[in-house]
Amino acid sequence: MSDQTFTDEELTSYLDEEASGALRREIDAAMLQDQHLRERLARLQIPREDVLHAFETLLGSAPDMEAFKSEKERLSKAHRRIVAGLAASLMIGVLLGANLFRGTQEPDWRDYVAAYQALYVNGTLANARTSEDNAQMVLAQLGKTIALDLAPAMSDPVLDFRRAQILGFEGQPLVQVAYLTPLGDPVALCIIKTDAAQSFDIDLSKREGMQSAAWSDGSHAYLLIGGEDADLISSAAQRFRDAL
């Protein structure tokens, strides 16, 4: 199917893990061949940290309700709140716009991955399981797309492999391999081919409130992210770094 076959609603349901199995398979297959489709999906993934921060700020500064005010005082207070609400809405719009412009000027694919992963909950991957033969086939196809043998990514002594799919960032294919921890937390290993990347060892940090580990071998950049167990992410990152 071509890129134009899929509506934004269908692609959004795909990103939100609400698409039917048939639709997800069609989009997965189409993304292997259609760079424009990968770019559309990347554009639909908007980091939400600034939006959440703006709303939290507004909630924190909301005035307490008072027991009683005269009619005139209450009307005056209501008028000021309406004006303040309009100003706050404008502020959120500016924050969103600034965030999008920052993403246009100096985008970091890891931030987009973190925002996407933050949408996952413990039940997202509960029923996402495929046969070993199908998983090997998918990993082989995705591996060709980014010129990397992904077979070792299917087997880990701690993380339970669930599925692999292709996403995209700025026209570049981005592979996501999804796992569950022993406690059921979703974890993703994301890989993008970077011809001019500088290699660096594992760097641990928190993104979108989740533990993450990033590293690069000079030809590919990696991000392992999910859950709150720093030791689990650190040790798993070392295993994947050595295996891939």
Image (tube, rainbow, N blue to C red):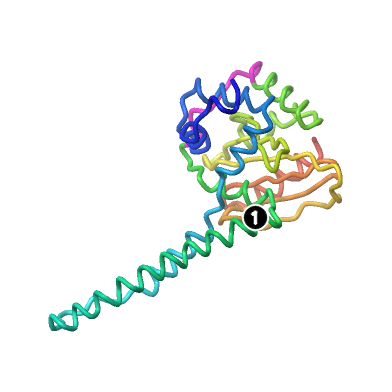
User: Which residue corresponds to the image point at 67% horizontal and 28% vertical from the top-left?
Assistant: 34
**In front: 226, or 175?**
175
Who is closer to the viewer here, 148 or 224? 148
Q: Residues within 10 Å of mark 1 (few under 14, many from 20)?
A: some
Image: 174 above or below 63 = above
Residue 4 pos. (x, y %): 56, 27
Q: Nearer the viewer, residue 147 or 5?
A: 5
Residue 57 percent across, percent down from the top left: 44, 70
The answer to whether residue 69 is left or right of residue 33 is left
Residue 99 locus on image (x, y percent): 59, 59
Q: Give the farthest residue toward the front.
A: 4
Q: Residue at x 71, y 39 (%)?
A: 171
Look at the image and tell me in which quarter the C terminus lies.
top right
Q: Quadrant of the N terminus?
A: top right
Residue 210, visible in the rendered structure: yes
Residue 158 visible to the viewer: no
| Residue found at the very far top of the displayed protein | 133
From this view, report whether residue 242 is shown above or below residue 47. above
Q: Considering the whole magenta stretch, tell me its main secondary structure.
A: loop
Task: Judge left or right: residue 76 versus residue 87.
Answer: left
- Is 163 in the magenta? no
**Quick one: 181 or 213, which is closer to the camera?**
213
Q: Say above or below: 106 vs 166.
A: below
- The residue indicated by pointer 1 is 103
Q: Secondary structure at mark 1?
A: helix
x and y percentages locating residue 8 in the rendered image: 50, 35
Q: Which portion, as a residue range, is magenta?
A: 124-134
User: Which residue does the image show at 60% across and 18% down from the upper left?
Assistant: 131
